[in-house]
Amino acid sequence: MKKIIPIEDGDFYWTPEGYRCFTAQYLLKREYCCESGCRHCPYGFNKNTNSVKK
């Protein structure tokens, strides 16, 4: 079961299109890479090559 992480200031922002975009701050608190190609992925995942930069 995934742990619930409370949302705090700086964890996301709204894009001009109206989507919520999570920041690296939040993604690091989550402690794993979801491999979805997040815009601010702190783990270095590349959706095009399907690999994580080490």
Image: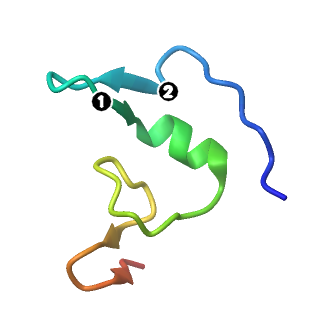
Circle 2 crowding by C-alpha within 10 Å: few under 14, some 14–19, many from 20: some
Mark 2, secondary structure of its residue: loop
- Residue 23 locus on image (x, y percent): 41, 36
The type of residue carrying mark 2 is Asp
The type of residue carrying mark 1 is Tyr
Residue at 50% x, 27% y: name it: 11
Residue at the outermost front position: 18
Residue 8 location, quadrant? top right
Residue at the outermost left position: 16
- Residue 36 locus on image (x, y percent): 39, 64
Q: Which residue is mark 1?
A: 19
Image quarter of the C terminus: bottom left
Q: Which residue is mark 2?
A: 11
- Residue 49 locus on image (x, y percent): 24, 85
Circle 1 crowding by C-alpha within 10 Å: few under 14, some 14–19, many from 20: few
Q: Mark 1 or mark 2: which comes first in sequence? A: 2
Mark 1, secondary structure of its residue: loop
Image quarter of the N terminus: bottom right
Disc marking residue 35: none
- Residue 47 locus on image (x, y percent): 28, 73
Distance of mark 1 from mark 2, alpha carbons?
13 Å
Residue 52 location, quadrant? bottom left
